Amino acid sequence: MLEDYHPIEEIEPAREAQYSDFPLSSTIKNVFASRGIEHLYRHQAEGILQVQEGKNVVVVAPTAGGKSEVFIVPAVDGAVNGENTLLLYPTKALARDQHLRFSEFALYGVRTETYDGDTAQGKREKIRANPPQIIISNMDMLHFILLNNRLFTKFFEKLKYVVLDEVHTYSGIFGAHASNVLWRLKRLIKKKFNRDIQFIATSATVGNAKEFCEGLCGEEFVLVEGNSSPRSEFHHLLVSPSESYSVAALRIADELGRKALIFGNSHSLVERMGLMASRMNIPLAVYRSGLRQGDRRRIESDFKAGRIKYLATTSALELGIDIGNTDVVVLAGFPGTITRVRQRIGRCGRKGKGYGIFVAKESPLDQYYIENKDEYLHGEPENCYINPKNENVRKLHTLSAAKDLMFSPEEVNEETLKIIESLEEEELLKKWGNFYSITKEGAMRARLINLRSAGASVKIYNSENEKRIGERGIGMAIKELFEGAIYLHGGRAYLSKKLDLEKMEAWVEPMDRQVEEYTSALSNKSAEVVEELASRECLGHKLFFGKVHITEEVYGFIIKDVFGATKIAEHTFETPYIYEYDTYALWLDVEDMVYDIPEFGDGLHAFEHVSISMMPAITGADPKELGGLSYPSGRMYVYDSVEDGNGVTQVVFSKFEKIVQMTKDRLEKCDCEKGCPKCILDPMCGNDNRYLNKESGKLIAEKLLKG
């Protein structure tokens, strides 16, 4: 059956390991020997040596490339010598999994404890009273630890290493928060204990790991490339099905009949695949964030033991959680970046031949990689991006820093003073002599900070039992939780009964029937320039970058069939849902083309769609982190889709010529007549893909490239 899809195939040969005779302490040597590790890889030895020389180190290696040993060795050696280590993981599941790797050192007096949201209160008190040498936590919990740092004095006074595992996950708005949390940690340790922190980071293969870590941590780093670990023979297959890509992904996994991970790119897609699999009699489990902890652990254990054969997952299993050996990874749609492709397919083939199958959906970027398989297989990894100076984020963490430790006069420069005065005006900070301290109201605000969002979040409640089941950032909430929306959560479908933007609450009701449809918001957007920050000549036109004010209005929704995305019905609201915010954007004026190109406005709309769909290949951003709009008068905007920006458009601003070339290539190579999902049709279009013209969009790209 796989042959029916006419796959493009390439075989990656096996690779031999390169070892080093690096000297290890007897403690580490004994534990490593019990794991079957007799020698370190060459890159592991290089990384440990750089750490021993006092440098901040980032190790870049593929999944299962042996990154962990570079921080395990210094952390254990440090513990033996009376120094403490803080290990920060992007997810609690990964932290729990990694804790097992340190527990074996307990026999030698090296204590390790996990301190996160799942740690019982009684256990937390014991950890604070008698801290171990190694604490495993996450960035969200570190925020609260810093707010209550007096309880952690015994640990912080001996802190030497801070480990940032999977550091590439701190791109975007989460990275802006993380950078500020690390700034607060460095400030506290220096001012209170007169110590400097040494950072050890690990990353998947990204294009700018060293520069990214330096921006995140505010320190110089040394890059160590992990290319000396072994690799089994690996089969890459690229498929562009004529049917639904999600259905094809399920069928291909079932046809191969081997233990398989099927990656989807969103919660809703993975949940829909669960519904499809049940109709197709395919025994599939669904795994994603937002599920209860006990359910996640049961699924992990069952998949590892082979009780679950097929598992559909979001990026929640992209990182190094131990789920045992996997034979096949199926990518249901391109995951946005080459980095994520390699991270995901690296989950299989660790013990013998592996298969990585990319099932392309009908989107411009997916089809671009089908047509350019060498870029998919061997292309340069994307850059990570970060905007640590996001004004809203910086303000929140300046407030929190005053709770960590009062601001002294020598810390207050012009930039900090401006923020402090704003917080003082809101009565969140107050001045005590020459020092600035947090108020009671400010402390309450600091405790409510959400590190995953730049703005406010809408709390989601089950209307049957009035229990809170989750939350969504307001920008996504107005598109997913409007009245009448079908919202999928934890394998169950809910009908949204009310979205109250004043109270920031959504009330949803469980749906008892089998759901065979989904909802999609209809919206209008507008942009207004607030401040121009930069401009440059680009393809014979002026390209601008700056701050803009975005207004998004959800005025209705459509209902579509879950299998074929066929439109079933459309509804318009009497009162639209409106969300306004300031962010960063780039914009281009091509008004000189308005009268030269037929149906210019529809063409610019088409050009906007395709160009934005190509941007993840350059930036590494998720498509949802970008927004766009165009006007028939000749202006096109591309903006960061979070309040105060996430840094994506700043990357696009410097590489816009490449985006235009990729856009032209896709429009020329798509063999449809008037436009299709493989080129100009965008499933996230707020206008339901109305007012588009493929030929005019291609003419705009051609004219730009001619300069």
Image: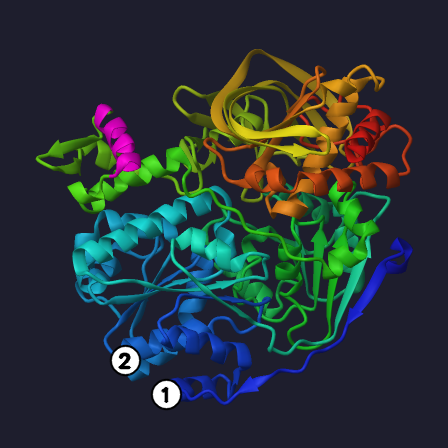
Left or right: where 446 falls relative to 625: left
Density class for disc 2 (Cα within 10 Å; few <14, some 14-19, many ≥20) is some
Is residue 406 something that shows in the picture?
Answer: no
Residue 220, percent from left and from top: 41, 60
Is residue 268 something that shows in the picture?
Answer: yes
What amino acid is found at the position of numbered circle 2 in the picture? Val
261, above or below 702, in the image: below
Left or right: where 263 falls relative to 426: right
| Nearer to us in this view, 292 or 47 | 47
Q: Residue at position x 53%, y 21% from top?
A: 529
Residue 259, percent from left and from top: 69, 66
Density class for disc 1 (Cα within 10 Å; few <14, some 14-19, many ≥20) is few
Give the residue number, with chain letter if any, for mark 2.
80
Is residue 416 highlighted in magenta?
yes
Residue 691, percent from left and from top: 77, 19
623, above or below 480, in the image: below
Q: Residue at position x 19%, y 54% from top?
A: 191
The reply to whether discs 1 and 2 touch (Cβ–Cβ < 8 Å) is yes
Q: Residue at position x 39%, y 73% from top?
A: 51
Q: Which of disc 2 and disc 1 is earlier in sequence?
A: 1
What amino acid is found at the position of numbered circle 1 in the picture? Ser
Scheme by which the image is coloured = rainbow
- The residue lying furthest to the top in this view is 574
Q: CA distance from mark 1 to mark 2?
A: 10 Å
SS for callout 2: helix
SS for callout 1: loop
Q: Quadrant of the N terminus?
A: bottom right
Q: Residue at position x 68%, y 35% from top?
A: 612
Q: Which residues are magenta?
A: 413-425
Q: Quadrant of the C terminus?
A: top right
Q: Which mark is residue 25?
A: 1
